[in-house]
Amino acid sequence: MELDRCLELLYRGRLLPEVTIEALCFKLKEMLIKESNVIHISTPVTVVGDMHGQFHDMLEMFRIGGKIPDTNYLFLGDYVDRGLYSVETIMLLITLKLRYPNRIHLLRGNHESRQITQSYGFYTECLNKYGGSSRVWNLITDLFDYLVLACIIDDELFCVHGGLSPNVQTIDQIRIIDRFREIPHDGAMADLVWSDPEENGMNTRDSSFDNSNSGNSNSNRNRNNMNGNSDIAEDFLIETSEHFQVSPRGAGYTFGRSVVEKFLQLNGMDRIYRAHQLCSEGYQVYFGGLVTTVWSAPNYCYRCGNKASILELYSRDSFYFNVFEEAPEIRRNTFHNDSSNNISDWNPLSDTEYYNEEMLTPQSSSITTRKIISDYFEEDTLSHISRRNNGFSLLQGFSETNELNETNMGVDVFSDSYQSKSASNRRVEYFL
């Protein structure tokens, strides 16, 4: 199967041709559009926080936590930007999702956005790796609009990239959001990917979250049982805001213990797992375990020196924070310890042999390219794929809706008129 061939190349750090990326993104959108804004999965599952284009560290994470399909994974978003290998990182995850759809689930983070990726690296990386063309960036950021917003594990563990929203009291309100669009500047969708718990509500002394063993959480049902630990009890008395506060990020809100308790009680949830914030030890526990941040990008930006973690959930109350450091191949490069070196000049894959240079443009007539695409679509009878000049005119249906053409012509995809037109052309089945 050609998906396996793509995975083989991606695991070796090679770039896929643009025409293959186009096909993979199209097929994944077909899959994701059928999913609810809030998906339900069961343990055992490993929860992964921000990766931010740190491809080698993601491979290290798979070595530590287990490869797919041997291990179930839930990724909490922020796959691109900051790191040097966002294309390789997101394409491996896209292909894994297509190959093993029930083994890996991908949530949307605040960096899965056209606007953010133009400022924090992904857009420039696509231009540099694909000959100055923004086509790959357009394809992948269009796919981002289809990623789900939240996940519930074992009917009691709520997972989201950022946090809670004053516009969302119930999970049903998340289910009816029109997610198939660019992340707006405000509103419920923006809050879910941008919000943070209040810093003075964090609790790092709770022995039930000691990383040396599996923990039995202090749920909202048994959080009053403090096992006689006066230090922990003091942490529970830390005052936090009873209402949402404006976030210093400029988007989303900060929320305290009272807000969390109300949300959990109203929705019958036990606790919240999220990402979005750098943690020096790889994870951070708030409000006595009601909220936990998981961070999975070690030595963030190749210079922060932080640890990373993945959260291995064996059941609702049995879990383990598997803490790890940056990949050995990165650690061997000491550029981040030398202030005279520039990170942008470092390229551990500079000697990587890319997958057939002639295949990096959609105009390529490579026999190998045609084989990948033809085999991948051989089970489909899609009317928008036509044979022409012994090759393929891929995804002709997009031309009919003018979506990609409008994007390439400089149409403002953030404008109300564009969003309204886009929404009117969609048929979305909401899951209530």
Image (cartoon, rainbow, N blue to C red):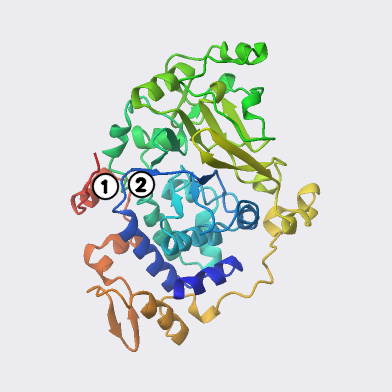
Q: Position of residue 274 (x, y in %)?
A: 50, 36
On screen, 384 above or below 128?
A: below
Q: Amino acid at mark 2?
A: Glu
Residue 244 appears anywhere in the view: no
Q: Quadrant of the rendered structure where residue 369 is?
A: bottom left
Along the viewing direction, whichever of 383 and 347 lies nearer the viewer: 383
Along the viewing direction, whichever of 184 and 268 lies nearer the viewer: 268
Label at residue 419? 1
Q: Quadrant of the rendered structure where residue 311 is?
A: top right
Mark 1 or mark 2: name the one nearer the start of the chain.
Answer: 2
Q: Position of residue 225 (x, y in %)?
A: 55, 15
Q: Position of residue 296 (x, y in %)?
A: 60, 45
Q: Residue at x 43, y 72 (%)?
A: 20
Q: Amino acid at mark 1?
A: Gln
Q: Is residue 60 left or right of residue 107?
A: right
Image quadrant for the C terminus?
top left
Q: Is residue 195 left or right of residue 323?
A: left
Image quadrant for the N terminus?
bottom left
Mark pair 1, 2: CA separation: 9 Å
Which residue is labeled 2 in the image? Answer: 182
Q: Secondary structure at mark 2?
A: loop
